[in-house]
Image (spheres, rainbow, N blue to C red):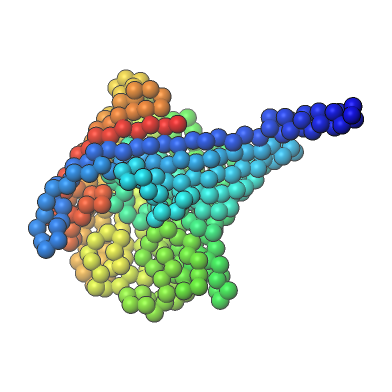
């Protein structure tokens, strides 16, 4: 009996030690705003106004679990399960995927972290260096396919180095899982980051390739990079052809209560073809350049104001070039460390293009105005 008690005590001590060396955290964020958009295209022609409760207005709502375990010898096991939420309807975001934002498991060492699963690439990380950080989904359309707003790569392996002298780098590969050719449905990404005091500089690159009917496409978005079958209507190229190439250069500088940011992105769709709508991200949009500059200022420790200008220059196959310009202003007030309220406005104008558009409201003219108030809570 005493031996059994001793064994049970020993097991209990081992379990306590294991628990002390590992952790699991439940976390989340809920964000929604009441949004007004004018000049929204309506069926049959013309335009109207629209009011909506827009989910994830400033920051996409999500909930998840993350954890780690100390394996000893400088190694640590990591995992993240994170799903998106549409607060307005209670449905899962990312097309209804239960863990659509991120599902990864990996190992961390003194050299860096290796993660495998569904995850964002470095360009998505660079969203914190663009207007995305201050205005959320309000700027999603005009940033288009530069991947600085909530894109992920399936079937991917990513390495993030530790920081050395302020510099770090990352590399990602998305596997197409196709027996015919390695490149079909695959994706690749690279990134570099440098931090020195209040200055941050970063550069990122991403490409995705055309899949086949049997390729498990790696890329979340982009013409012909979502598993389109070669030979289908409007699709050119063959399995493994590059469907999207995009890169971004960005910088931020924190100067006392002021933060300045500037970024330049360019994305190309080599498989774009004539005849598609003359709109950003369409099948005829062969190249887009995005310039984003802005600033935010802490009026008080609780009140922040921000402004930015984003300009897109677009090339279309077999048609004239076009452009989009969007102006954004906003204010954000923190009621506590976990809860803030905000008010934003945006105005977009298009030139030599079919329509402009803000959020999910297609533009019914060459210009469009958005105004919203919202609340965000973190837990």
The answer to whether any part of residue 255 appears in the image is no
Tell me where residue 244 appears, x and y as whole percent: 40, 63
Tell me where residue 323 appears, x and y as whole percent: 21, 56
User: Between 373 and 296, which is closer to the camera in this rendering?
Assistant: 373
Q: Residue at x 35, y 33 (%)?
A: 376
User: Between 101 and 369, which is closer to the camera in this rendering?
Assistant: 101
User: Between 350 and 359, which is closer to the camera in this rendering?
Assistant: 359
Tell me where residue 121 appears, x and y as whole percent: 48, 51
Quadrant of the image containing the C terminus: top left
Q: Which residue is drawn at 90% across and 27% down?
A: 2
Tell me where residue 286 appears, x and y as whole percent: 31, 65
Task: Describe residue 245's horizontal placement relative to residue 342 as left or right.
Answer: right
Which residue occupies the extreme front position in the image? 1
Quadrant of the image containing the N terminus: top right
Which residue occupies the extreme top position in the image? 300
Q: Which residue is drawn at 55% across and 74% down?
A: 181
Marks counted in the figure total 0
Compared with residue 379, is residue 186 higher up or lower down, i.e. above or below? below
Compared with residue 108, is residue 276 higher up or lower down, i.e. above or below? below
């Amino acid at each position: 009996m005493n031996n059994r008690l001793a064994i049970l005590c020993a097991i209990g001590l081992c379990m306590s030690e294991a628990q002390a060396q590992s952790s699991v955290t439940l976390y989340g964020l809920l964000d929604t705003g009441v949004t007004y958009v004018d000049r929204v295209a309506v069926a049959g022609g013309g335009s109207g106004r629209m009011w909506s409760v827009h989910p994830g207005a400033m920051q996409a709502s999500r909930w998840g679990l993350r954890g780690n375990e100390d394996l000893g010898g400088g190694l640590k096991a990591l995992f993240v399960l994170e799903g998106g939420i549409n607060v307005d309807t209670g449905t899962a975001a990312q097309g209804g995927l239960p863990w659509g934002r991120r599902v990864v498991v990996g190992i961390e060492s003194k050299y860096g972290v290796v993660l495998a699963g569904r995850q964002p690439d470095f360009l998505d990380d660079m969203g914190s260096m663009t207007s995305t950080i201050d205005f959320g989904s309000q700027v999603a359309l005009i940033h288009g396919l530069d991947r600085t707003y909530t894109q992920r790569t399936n079937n991917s392996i990513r390495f993030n180095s530790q920081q050395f002298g302020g510099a770090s780098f990352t590399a990602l590969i998305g596997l197409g899982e196709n027996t015919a050719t390695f490149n079909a449905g695959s994706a690749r990404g690279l990134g570099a980051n440098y931090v020195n005091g209040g200055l941050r500089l970063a550069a990122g690159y991403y490409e995705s390739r055309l899949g086949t009917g049997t390729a498990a496409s790696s890329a979340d978005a982009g013409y012909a990079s979502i598993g389109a079958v070669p030979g289908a209507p409007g699709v050119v190229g063959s399995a493994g052809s590059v469907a999207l190439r995009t890169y971004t250069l960005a910088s931020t500088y924190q100067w006392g209560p002021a933060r300045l940011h500037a970024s330049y992105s360019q994305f190309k769709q080599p498989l774009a073809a004539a005849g598609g709508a003359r709109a950003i991200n369409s099948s005829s949009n062969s190249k887009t350049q995005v310039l984003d500059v802005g600033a935010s200022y802490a009026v008080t420790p609780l009140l922040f104001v921000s402004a930015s200008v984003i300009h897109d220059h677009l090339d279309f196959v077999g048609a004239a070039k076009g452009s989009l310009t969007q102006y954004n202003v906003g204010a954000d007030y923190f009621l506590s460390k976990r809860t803030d309220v905000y008010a934003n406005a945006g105005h977009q104008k298009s030139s030599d293009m079919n329509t402009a558009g803000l959020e999910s409201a297609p533009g019914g003219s060459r210009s469009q105005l958005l105004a919203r108030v919202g609340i965000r809570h973190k837990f």
